[in-house]
Image (spheres, rainbow, N blue to C red):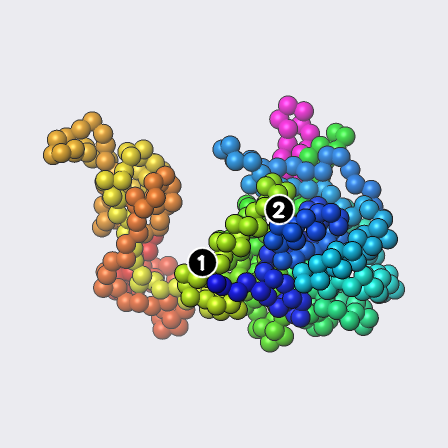
Amino acid sequence: MANLEIDFCGIKSPNPFWLASAPPANSAYQVQKAFEQGWGGAVWKTIGAPVLNVCNRYGTMDYKGRKIIGLNNVELISDRPIDLNLREIAEVKRNFPNHAVIVSVMVESEKKAWQDIVKRVEETGADGFELNFGCPHGMSERGMGSAMGQVPEYTCMVTEWVMEVATRPVIVKLTPNITDIVQPARAAVKGGASALSLINTINSIMGVDLDSFEIKPNVGGKGGHGGYAGAAVKPIALHLLSAVASDLEVQRARLPISGIGGVENWRDCVEFMLLGATSVQVCTAVMKWGFRIVEDMIDGMSNWMDDKGFQSVNDFIGASLPRISSFGDFDLGFQTVARINPDKCIHCNLCYIACNDAAHQCIDLKSAKLNGEVTSALQPVVREEDCVGCDLCANVCPVDDCITMVEIDTGRPHITWNELTKRRPEVLEWDKMEAYRKEANIHIH
């Protein structure tokens, strides 16, 4: 049986599945219930300066009958008294000593305020801290959250303040609302952080009501930007995670990363871990389906690890990072073509429409045959000599494995753009690029 236990900068957890700092981790009742159902850790909903929340707080993106593929919120940090939160954190840690209990904190940009709250949290016995430098709404307007996380110097400064007094691990939570997330990650390293977590929510406006013209969510007739989360943000989260995990300064510091953003099932968790995460935090999926989803995460990852022969999660954390490259290092000679399996084709012709209207017009509709007889159905057929291997047809096809992309040998040289321009810098001019294309038989569109 695979071992799912993790050691996250000294914080032990029975598995890598943690509740994110959010509504599902807002009280002792919730966190203890989550632990009973199998969650390995929880990051307590951010505590700090007193706030008043508003109604309505959430707006969602639904798609073709599927609810909440994206969730926008204008909720602030915990609106419960700090003393109550601290008592409940201590209670949870006493009752579940082998689970990870991390406390998210956010206060005004004053050294004394940060150090005071860290000292108070440490008295609860919690395992560590997560510094919320990512919240994009409400708190940022007060100079907190992403207002600090977007300025690397502030990230470093506050991290140093906290590290002066903290005796437990300190995780810095990064905002995605920045041009280059690597810069605040490096600032956290410089400030002495024990670990990183990312991403926090993405700044967004969820939508507009076409009848009332009101912003969603609607707060008494008004609305504004909020934090976007849910399954739809996963590709962005994976990109930013890989950017941080691949950075040499972060790697040299050997900081573990807690991955966040769009996680719904065990497959998502594995993807985050393959790109460098040691633990994975979940919020929106719990808000949609409840704590029970962790059961599938535990079973799914365990079975996958057994199938792959992995004994420990450490055997595959970061395994996909070496595969990430820049466009300039892609093989220009690698060529695929689309092939359609007529036995699986349902003649919806979506591939034909996509290719004809939005790609390279290399799929034809021909009369289909059944038992040797011509039928009224039209069969899409790829003209392979004109196919550029863009993969659009396979992506729009509703039938699994009906269209496959098959590598072919064209005899072209296997060369990258960086190698090409290094050998022949003159091909940067279009007319000379065309001449070189013909010489090297490279298909450029």
Closest to the observer, 149 or 18: 18
Which secondary structure class fits the magenta region best? Answer: loop
* Residue 178 in view (yes/no): no
* Residue on which disc 2 sits: 291
Residue in the image at 72% along x and 68% along y: 169
Q: Secondary structure at mark 2?
A: loop
Residue beneath the point at 59% across and 60% down: 16
**On the rendered structure, is 108 left or right of 401?**
right
Cα distance in 3D space between marks 1 and 2: 21 Å
Outermost residue, top direction? 211
Image position, residue 375 (x, y; %): 18, 28
Q: Return the residue nearer the eye: 50 or 431.
A: 50
Measured as percent of width and height from the top left, residue 128 is found at 73, 64
- Picture disc at residue 304: 1
Question: In the picture, residue 39 is in which quadrant?
Answer: bottom right
- Inspect the image, locate mark 2, and give the three-letter code of the amino acid beneath it: Phe
For mark 1, does the 10 Å Cα neighbourhood hold few (<14), some (14 to 19), or many (20 or more) residues? some
Crowding around mark 2 (Cα neighbors within 10 Å: few <14, some 14 to 19, many 20+) is: many
Q: Which residues are magenta?
A: 205-216
Q: Is residue 208 on the magenta stretch?
A: yes
Residue ranking furthest to the left:
372
Res 57 → quadrant: top right
**Residue 232 visible, this angle:** yes
In the rendering, at what x and y percent does residue 153 appear?
A: 74, 66
